[in-house]
Amino acid sequence: PQPLAALRTLSGNTVRFLERGQLDVASTNLKTINELIDRMGRITASLRSFARRGDDQGRASLGKGVDAALQLLGSRMESLPLQLHRDFTDVQVQIDQTRLEQILVNLIGNALDAMQSQPQPTLWLEGEEFDGKYRLRVRDNGHGIDAEARKHLFEPFFTTKPGEQGLGLGLTLSASLAAATGGHLGVEHPASGGTTFVLSLPLVSPTPAEPI
Ligand SMILES: Nc1ncnc2c1ncn2[C@@H]1O[C@H](COP(=O)(O)OP(=O)(O)OP(=O)(O)O)[C@@H](O)[C@H]1O
Ligand SMILES: [Mg+2]
């Protein structure tokens, strides 16, 4: 689940095996390390090509983005008795429509994962305009994030999900997509429990009037 942590353990062990002259084990470890590095390389290559910074000239409708994300997550939404509170404006923001959907699918998907054992799963999508940007809060009443995990949330390959369920790239990618357009992705940990991700994106400014 966490290739970086696995790599660190393996390389540490390998040093010890080499010191003890156990070359066979060291060699096997190095081959495993090679495979992990190849896998991470493939993942980061596709991440880079997807999140090429600085070239996002797009415009998106927030309402359309949320609807598309919810539709994509449809089957997973239906497996929960989810209460959904929508309290945002359908503003136009400066981001490619597909990228916006990608971010929202990850944030809402993460929230659904965190609410699996919550008897009354509730998702709040709340928006406000602030300083030329639109801030969308994606808040859940799931299990929350413990102190240790909070430090690593936005690191590539950090995941607490078992097996192939999570690559640990969703938040890294989402933050990178938001930053590429002058926005930001942050997180809050409400005292009442659950987690809130705060997505800020520049608003599309009204077309300036013709000079007189
Ligand atoms: N809403 C949330 N509630 C609780 N924990 C969360 C929430 N969102 C993210 N996390 C934690 O942050 C980790 C990293 O999230 P991220 O989206 O980057 O990766 P992932 O969901 O594990 O895998 P991927 O998104 O690549 O499929 C998750 O594994 C989980 O532990
Ligand atoms: Mg995720």
Image (tube, rainbow, N blue to C red):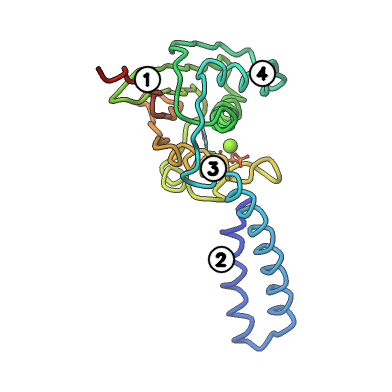
Image quadrant holding the C terminus, namely: top left
10 Å crowding of disc 4: few (<14), some (14-19), many (20+): few
Mark 3 sits on what residue? 173
Q: CA distance from mark 4 to mark 2?
A: 39 Å
Q: Position of residue 80 (x, y in %)?
A: 65, 17
Q: CA distance from mark 1 to mark 2?
A: 52 Å
Task: Tell us which disc is closer to us: 1 or 2.
Answer: 1
Mark 1 sits on what residue? 207
* Residue type beneath disc 4: Gln
Mark 2 sits on what residue? 8
Pick whichever, 200 or 30, lies toward us. 200
Q: Position of residue 81 (x, y in %)?
A: 63, 12
Q: CA distance from mark 3 to mark 1?
A: 30 Å
Mark 4 sits on what residue? 71
Task: Tell us which disc is closer to us: 3 or 1.
Answer: 1
* Residue type beneath disc 1: Thr
Most distant residue in the front direction: 212
What residue is at 49 percent from the left and 46 percent from the top? 53
**For residue 62, which numbered disc appears in the image?**
none
